[in-house]
Image (cartoon, helix red, strand yellow):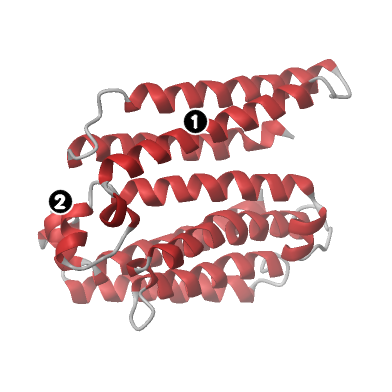
Amino acid sequence: LQSLAYAVFPSLLMNLYITGLNQITDVEIDKINKPELVIAKGDLGKGTAIGIVLVALLASLIMSVTHPLYSTAGLQVALWGSFLLGTMYSLPPFRMKRHPLLAAFCIVAVRGTIINAGFYSHALSSAFGKSMGVMNCLKNDWKCSLSSLFFGVFGIVIALMKDVPDAHGDRIFNIKSFTVRVGQTKVFRTMKNLLTILFGVFGAALMQWAFMAPNLFVGARRGLVGCLCWLAGWSTRKEAKGVDAEDSVEVYDYYMHLWKLFYLSYLVLPFAK
């Protein structure tokens, strides 16, 4: 629990830095796409926001290297990797979010590889005393590989769905997102279908794995998680019915539903083992 608590706090600070930086660099776009955000609305000054994200960044990076036991290599990879790619995503001269393929790479790398494999390695080192690097986790531990694949694909869905209600402002500011290039309806339908398939495939795999369990309790637990995967896939399709892909409010509500499924997936992940 102590290793978990130590990892959670700098991770929240790093998330504050990345999301805050994105808002700071997109103030003018957000005045069109998300005028309710605190910086775009004017409730939080840009200078104050910059100070907050810098303090959060420094505190997060310092915590990643100062503790003799809990500042593991896995935690450092998760935090420093997120910092580097999160900065390159938002800030010039890179501003990778302007380029669909680079933006997708950032999302897959952070959501899939860096966060999952980094924290998996951190847990092995700090809680169980097993020293295993991030790349070794990905190559030699199938649980780490599959969870990274699942959340990497889910991360793509969330990131591209986020661009659907932002299409108007992105066009004005020349952000060549996939939505701007191929259209809101096509991206919405494709991401909905991709997430439904993802839940369906992993649900089926868990159900099959349940029959290979060493005892009834483990089998029932895996089967339950598999059923929850199918339920999440059903929910993904159900909530999409009647949503107008060109209505920003409707798509944003659906997008927030996907975030709920994302965090619920993390919540049930320990029970899938």
Residue lying furthest right: 214
Q: Position of residue 235 (x, y in %)?
A: 43, 23
In this rendering, position of residue 258 left or right of residue 209: left
Left or right of 78, for residue 263 = left
User: What label sits on residue 133 in the rendered view?
Assistant: none
Q: Nearer the viewer, residue 219 or 240?
A: 240
Mark 1: secondary structure: helix
For marks 2 and 1, the one nearer the N-term is 2
Q: Secondary structure at mark 2?
A: loop
Q: Amino acid at mark 2?
A: Glu
Residue placed at 25% from the left, 70% from the top? 24
Q: Is residue 252 left or right of residue 247?
A: right
Assign the C terminus to one quadrant of the image. Answer: top right
Q: Is residue 102 visible?
A: yes
Left or right: residue 66 compared with residue 21: right
Whether residue 34 is visible here, answered yes or no, is no
Mark 2 surroundings within 10 Å by alpha-carbon count, few (fewer than 14), some (14 through 19), many (20 or more)? few
Marks 2 and 1, Cα distance to the nearest angstrom?
30 Å
Give yes or no for contact between labels 2 and 1 (Cβ–Cβ under 8 Å): no
Of tags 2 and 1, the one toward the viewer is: 1
- Residue that badge 1 annotates: 196
Residue found farthest to the bottom: 93
> Residue 26: x and y, percent?
23, 67
Residue at 68% in and 31% down: 271
Question: Mark 2 highlights which residue?
Answer: 36
